[in-house]
Amino acid sequence: MNIDTYNKMTALAREYYQKAGIVVREDEQIEVADFNLGMVEKVGLQLCVYINTERVCAKEMVLLPYQTCPEHKHIASYGMEGKEETFRCRYGKVYLYVSGEGKKENINGVLPETDTTVYHEIILNPGEQYTIMPETLHWFQAGLEGAVVSEFSTKSTDETDVFTDKRIVRETKIEE
């Protein structure tokens, strides 16, 4: 991703935090995860990590309208079991898909341009939350307004996430 795209996406994320009434200080870094696919506005995620210790993690995530965080699971790594995470919607609508009953032709979200296999749909509106257990395949997407989601979890080791779509690389590279 080039620096202009990165700056555009972080500026948009700050606008969404403001819409949700969430204060993110200017000195707090916003990460733009583009998953190395070159279509960050469709498949991507903007996030600010408040804390990530050996025991807990807290993040604020921004998704633009219909932007998708691709299907993945959190596996055991660094001697710990996979990440357990709770998503709480702060703004907009979030379509969360996890293992379970559900068919892709019945979902309310838009199928992303990445491989997906799980379609059990959970719709989160502001104030609603859902907990995802370790090793659970999941993907999520914002609705028409975009979304802001708080994540509370055990230690985050995103670099070890296993993605269904093998083209995906979790490390973001910014080109000058």
Image (cartoon, rainbow, N blue to C red):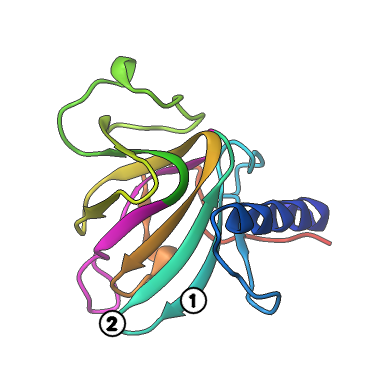
Residue that mark 2 sits on: 55
Magenta stretch contains residue 147: no
- Please identify the quarter of the rendering in which residue 173 is found: bottom right
How would you rate the neighbour count of disc 1 (Cα within 10 Å): few for under 14, some for 14-19, many for 20 or more? few
- Viewer-nearest of labels 1 and 2? 1
Q: Where is residue 136 in the image (x, y as percent from the top left)?
A: 22, 50
The quadrant the C terminus occupies is bottom right
Is residue 74 visible in the rendered image? The answer is: no
Q: What residue type is labelled 2?
A: Arg
Stretch of the chain drawn in magenta: 66-89
Where is residue 46? Give x, y as percent. Answer: 58, 55
How many numbered circles are shown?
Answer: 2
In the rendered structure, which amino acid carries the disc numbered 1? Tyr
Q: Residue placed at 82% from the left, 53% from the top?
A: 4
Q: Position of residue 11 (x, y in %)?
A: 73, 56
- Viewer-proximal residue among 132 and 43: 132
Q: What percent of the width, then of the height, locates residue 116?
A: 36, 32
Between 71 and 56, the one nearer to me in the picture: 56
The mark nearer the N terminus, 1 or 2, is 1
Report the disc number at residue 50: 1
Which residue appears at 60% of the width and 50% of the height? 34
In this image, 39 relative to 88: left or right? right
Q: Distance between the residues labelled 1 and 2?
A: 13 Å
Where disc 1 sits, the SS reads strand
**Side of 34 where 133 appears, left or right:** left
In terms of secondary structure, where does tag 2 sit? loop
